[in-house]
């Protein structure tokens, strides 16, 4: 059986087809998580926001006027929910030490914790748009055209953000662990 297009799945979901929405979730979960993580910087918060955004998308599926552009519509919901969650978190003034202790429980290797901390630190130096583009492009495989449509930017602008973000990440990570970053780059 041929794989349904996003537009077909959205149309079916609008008619109440739960399996169609389930397929939309499966196709877009990583992207939703990546955008939420880019805004929030904390994996468990990003998880919560991504799930919350899918619930909101299901409740408002009829508001998606252009089914072929579901990805961009969903990403806007995720970004808005993540920004709202970030504001709430700032008000709560959550302790950063608690987050680090939670992350340590997810891994057995001290090296992995250090690497995650370095990467999180490097990602935090980027703008929110740069983080979204890096995570969606490099981790989820989105094309520049898909990024441009979802983020409301030109493809050239997406490429510029990606180039700038990668250069900044490389510089930041090389300062933290120069031998690992330079490995395999010919420098």
Image (cartoon, helix red, strand yellow):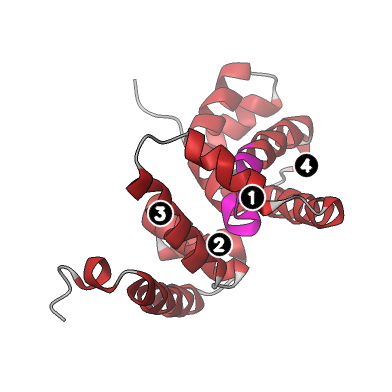
**Residue 2 sits inside the magenta stretch:** no
Q: Which residue is mark 1?
A: 97
Label 4 or label 3, whichever comes before in sequence order:
4
Callout 4 touching callout 1 (CB < 8 Å) = no
In the image, taking residue 181 as reference, residue 105 lies left or right, namely right
Label 2 or label 1, whichever comes before in sequence order:
1
How far is mark 4 from mark 2, CA to CA? 18 Å
How far is mark 2 from mark 1, CA to CA? 37 Å
How far is mark 4 from mark 3, CA to CA? 43 Å
Secondary structure at badge 4 equals: helix
Secondary structure at badge 1 equals: helix
From the viewer's perspective, is residue 45 above or below residue 83? above
- Highlighted magenta segment, given as a residue range: 37-47
Callout 4 touching callout 2 (CB < 8 Å) = no
Q: Which residue is mark 4?
A: 63
Q: Foreground residue, 99 or 38?
A: 99
Callout 2 touching callout 3 (CB < 8 Å) = no
Secondary structure at badge 3 equals: helix
């Amino acid at each position: 059986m041929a794989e349904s297009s996003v537009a077909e799945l959205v149309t079916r979901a609008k008619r109440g087809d739960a399996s169609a929405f389930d397929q939309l979730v499966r196709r877009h979960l990583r992207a939703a998580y990546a955008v939420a993580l880019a805004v929030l910087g904390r994996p468990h918060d990003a998880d919560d926001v991504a799930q919350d955004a899918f619930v909101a998308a299901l409740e408002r599926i009829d508001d998606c006027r252009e089914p072929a552009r579901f990805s961009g519509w969903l990403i806007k919901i995720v970004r808005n929910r993540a920004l709202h969650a970030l504001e709430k978190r700032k008000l709560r003034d959550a302790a950063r030490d608690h987050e680090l202790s939670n992350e340590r429980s997810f891994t057995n290797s001290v090296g992995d914790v250090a690497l995650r901390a370095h990467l999180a630190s490097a990602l935090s130096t980027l703008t929110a748009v740069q983080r979204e583009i890096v995570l969606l492009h490099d981790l989820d495989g989105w094309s520049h055209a898909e990024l441009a449509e979802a983020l409301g930017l030109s493809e050239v602008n997406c490429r510029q953000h990606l180039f700038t973000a990668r250069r900044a990440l490389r510089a930041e990570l090389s300062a933290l662990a120069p031998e690992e970053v330079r490995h395999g780059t010919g420098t």
